[in-house]
Amino acid sequence: MAASIDYILQVQSNKIQQAVPPIGGRRRKLFSEVVKSQDNNKRYKITLKPKETTTTPEQIRSQLKNGINPTEIKVGIKAVKTIRDRCLIIET
């Protein structure tokens, strides 16, 4: 496999080709790599608000852990965050 144009340094006097990394030290990403990484970053957010004013976010969190099994419904939960007004945000 030949080296990319970005990695070849030609010395005119000796006619030697040498593979050299680009100035930044990182190789350039292919278009397919950039598009593939964008598809993986899709996250969905669900906001949960309690009906009762006495319910705390910790109570909602414990009800979710006891009542729902995410692996049964094939949903991956990445984060559960508490926000103001006693609400929870679930990121999948």
Image: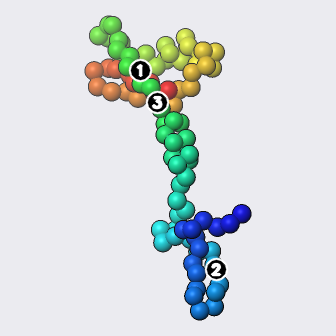
Q: Residue furthest bottom?
A: 13
| Residue 57 visible to an observer of this rendering | no
* Residue drawn at the location 49% of the way across and 40% of the way down: 38
x and y percent of residue 90 in the render?
44, 24
At label 1, the amino acid type is: Ile
Which quarter of the picture shows residue 5? bottom right
* Residue marked by disc 2: 17
At label 2, the amino acid type is: Gln
| Residue 18 visible to an observer of this rendering | yes
* Residue drawn at the location 29% of the way across and 10% of the way down: 53
Q: Residues within 10 Å of mark 3 (few under 14, many from 20)?
A: few
The answer to whether the residues at label 2 and label 3 have Cβ atoms under 8 Å apart is no
* Residue marked by disc 3: 43
Q: Nearer the viewer, mark 2 or mark 3?
A: 2
x and y percent of residue 62 in the render?
49, 17
* Residue marked by disc 1: 46
- Whichever of labels 2 and 3 marks the residue nearer the N terminus, that label is 2
What SS does tag 1 mark?
strand
